[in-house]
C-alpha cells in the first residue's frame, strides 16, 4: 500500500482571522498563504472546547469532550487515533506540544520530542511541574533561564501595562516556536527510512506570554490593525460567569498576562502587534519545514494539515485568552493541503468541527478508521458534495469555578447555556450581529429561537450519550 505522508501542524491559541490569505490583510503570513492558495480552507471550522486539553482530547479521539470525560485542563486522555495510524504502518513522531495527560504518555507515537506551555514557572517542582520537556533541557544545558511570569514580572518594565505582551529577551534560537521548528526540520532531515511518516508538529505559540522576537515585531511597527473596544452596554449584558472570569484574569495573571478592566486602544494595538508577530514567526517556521519536506521528497505524496486548538479574544468583548464561547475562541484556522487529491485554492464556509478533519485524513490516506461517534468526515465538504453540519457544539468547565457551559452555533444563531445559572446565558443573531456584541438572551421577542436552540443542545447531548 502506498500510504501518504501526513504532516499535522497545530498552533496553540491562534485566531481564525490571522492569515493574510484568508482576508486578514494586516498579517504577514506568506507560507500559510501558500497553503491557502494550494489547499482547502475550512473557514467555519470550530473547536469543541474553548481550552487546550479538552479541545485536543476531542480532536485526537474524534469524540466530544463529554464523551471522553475531558472538560478542562488537567483532564486525562484515554484514547488517541495516532495509535491506529501507527498500527497501519506509519512511523509516528511528535515534535512540540500535544498537551497530552499524562504529558509523557506514548499515545501511539514511536518518538516524542515534547514541548509544553511557554509559561511553566516551576517546571521542576510538583504539582505544577515535575517534568522537563525538550525545551527545558535545551535552556538548562545552555545555561539560560527560561522566560516566565516570574522573570517578566521582575525584569520587564511593561509588566504592569503590557497585558502579557513582551519582546523575547533571549537569542532567537531559544524561542519555543523557533526551537520546535528547528527540531521538526532535524527529524525530517535526518530521517532515512522509507516507512510513511506521520509527523505531528505542535507550536506553543501564539499562546501567551505574547513574546515574539524583535525582527518580527518590527514588521508590524507601522501596521494598522482594527481594534474592537468593549462598551459598558456589552459588559452589562454578559453573564455573571464572564465577570468572574475577567476578574480571574486580572488577579491571577495566568500565563504572564496581567489583564486590565478596560485596556486602552493603544494597549490593545500593542498587544495585537505582538500576537501577530508571533504568528509571523510561526509562519516562517512552517515555510522552512515545507522546504525540508520538499527537499526530502515527502511532499510528492503527502497531506499537510494546519490548524489551531482554539483562539483568543485579544481584548474583544473585554476578554483575554479563551474560556468563553465567542467565535474569536471557538473558530479556528483549518487548512488541508493535498495537491492532486483535494481542490486547490478552495474556501468553504460550511460548518465543521475540528475533529471532522480526521476521518478525511484516514480516507485520503487509505487507512482503516477507528470507531467514533462524534466526528463527521469533512471530505465531502472539501469535494463540494456536502453543505457540512447544521450546527456545531462546544463545551467546558469554567475557569476558577464549577460552572459547566456549552454552546450550539448554527450559521445564523449562537446560544450558550450555563448549567448552574439557568436564568442567564448568551444568544446572538449572527446574521445581524456577526461580532457577537448584542446579547439577546433576556429579550422576550427571541424566546422562540432560544427554546429551539436549547432543544437542539439537549438533543445533541442525548444522542451523544446514546451513541
Image (cartoon, rainbow, N blue to C red):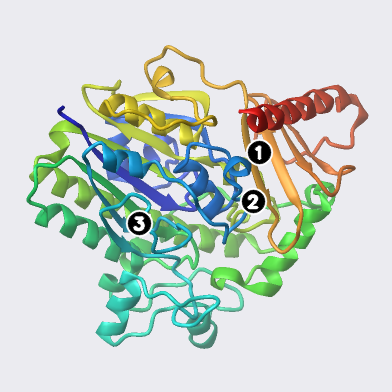
Report the quarter where the C terminus lies.
top right
Residue at 45% in and 66% down: 117
Q: Element under label 2?
A: helix
Q: Residues within 10 Å of mark 1 (few under 14, many from 20)?
A: some
For the residues labelled 3 and 2, the Cα–Cα distance comes to 38 Å
Residue at 39% in and 41% down: 81
Q: Which mark is residue 106?
A: 3
The spot of residue 155 in percent (x, y) is: 48, 87
Tell me which label, 2 or 1, sits earlier in the chain: 2
Q: Element under label 1?
A: loop
Tell me which label, 3 or 2, sits earlier in the chain: 3
Q: Which residue sits furthest right?
A: 444
Q: Which mark is residue 435?
A: 1
Q: Element under label 3?
A: loop
In the visual, does 429 lie left or right of 451?
A: left
The spot of residue 454 in percent (x, y) is: 79, 30
Q: Residue 448: name its quadrant.
A: top right
Residue at 58% in and 39% down: 64
Which of the two discs, 3 and 2, sits closer to the camera? 3
Q: Residue 290: name its quadrant.
A: top left
Q: Residues within 10 Å of mark 2 (few under 14, many from 20)?
A: some
Report the quarter where the N terminus lies.
top left
The spot of residue 319 in percent (x, y) is: 67, 56
Amino acid at each position: 500500500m502506498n500510504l501518504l505522508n501526513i504532516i499535522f501542524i497545530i498552533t496553540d491559541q491562534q485566531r481564525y482571522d490571522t492569515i493574510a490569505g484568508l482576508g486578514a490583510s494586516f498579517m504577514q503570513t506568506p507560507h500559510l498563504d501558500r497553503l491557502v492558495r494550494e489547499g482547502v480552507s475550512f473557514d467555519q471550522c470550530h473547536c469543541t472546547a474553548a481550552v487546550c486539553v479538552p479541545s485536543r482530547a476531542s480532536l485526537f479521539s474524534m469524540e466530544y469532550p463529554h464523551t471522553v470525560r475531558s472538560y478542562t485542563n488537567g483532564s486525562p486522555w484515554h484514547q488517541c487515533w495516532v495509535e491506529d495510524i501507527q498500527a497501519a504502518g506509519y512511523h509516528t513522531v511528535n515534535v512540540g506540544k500535544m498537551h497530552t495527560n499524562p504529558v509523557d504518555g506514548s499515545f501511539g507515537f514511536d518518538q516524542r520530542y515534547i514541548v509544553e506551555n511557554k509559561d511553566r514557572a516551576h517546571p521542576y517542582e510538583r504539582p505544577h511541574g515535575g517534568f522537563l520537556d525538550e525545551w527545558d533541557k535545551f535552556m538548562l544545558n545552555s545555561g539560560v533561564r527560561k522566560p516566565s511570569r516570574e522573570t517578566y514580572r521582575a525584569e520587564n518594565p511593561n509588566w504592569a501595562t503590557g497585558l502579557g505582551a513582551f519582546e523575547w529577551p533571549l537569542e532567537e534560537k531559544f524561542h519555543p516556536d523557533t526551537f520546535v521548528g528547528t527540531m521538526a526540520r532535524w527529524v525530517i532531515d535526518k530521517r532515512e527510512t522509507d516507512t510513511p511518516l506521520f509527523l505531528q508538529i505542535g507550536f506553543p505559540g501564539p499562546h501567551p506570554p505574547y513574546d515574539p522576537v524583535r525582527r518580527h515585531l518590527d514588521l508590524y511597527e507601522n501596521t494598522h490593525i482594527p481594534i474592537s473596544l468593549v462598551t459598558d452596554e456589552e459588559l452589562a449584558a454578559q453573564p455573571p460567569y464572564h465577570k468572574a472570569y475577567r476578574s480571574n484574569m486580572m488577579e491571577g495573571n495566568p500565563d504572564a498576562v496581567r489583564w486590565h478592566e478596560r485596556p486602552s486602544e493603544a494597549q490593545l494595538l500593542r498587544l495585537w502587534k505582538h500576537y501577530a508577530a508571533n504568528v509571523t514567526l510561526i509562519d516562517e517556521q512552517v515555510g522552512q519545514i515545507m522546504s525540508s519536506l520538499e527537499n526530502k521528497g515527502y511532499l510528492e505524496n503527502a497531506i499537510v494539515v494546519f490548524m489551531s486548538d482554539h483562539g483568543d479574544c485579544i481584548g474583544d468583548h473585554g476578554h483575554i485568552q479563551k474560556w468563553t464561547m465567542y467565535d474569536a475562541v471557538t473558530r479556528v484556522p483549518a487548512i488541508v493541503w493535498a495537491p492532486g487529491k483535494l481542490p486547490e485554492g478552495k474556501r468553504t464556509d460550511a460548518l465543521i468541527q475540528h475533529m471532522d478533519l480526521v476521518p478525511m485524513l484516514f480516507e485520503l490516506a487509505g487507512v482503516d478508521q477507528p470507531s467514533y461517534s462524534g466526528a463527521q468526515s469533512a471530505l465531502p465538504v472539501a469535494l463540494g458534495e456536502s453543505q457540512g453540519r447544521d450546527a456545531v457544539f462546544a463545551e467546558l468547565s469554567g475557569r476558577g469555578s464549577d460552572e459547566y457551559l456549552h454552546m450550539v452555533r448554527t450559521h445564523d444563531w449562537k446560544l450558550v447555556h450555563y448549567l448552574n445559572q439557568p436564568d442567564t446565558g448568551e444568544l446572538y443573531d449572527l446574521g445581524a450581529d456577526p461580532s457577537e456584541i448584542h446579547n439577546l438572551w433576556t429579550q422576550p421577542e427571541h424566546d422562540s429561537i432560544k427554546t429551539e436552540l436549547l432543544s437542539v443542545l439537549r438533543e445533541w447531548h442525548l444522542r451523544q450519550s446514546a451513541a
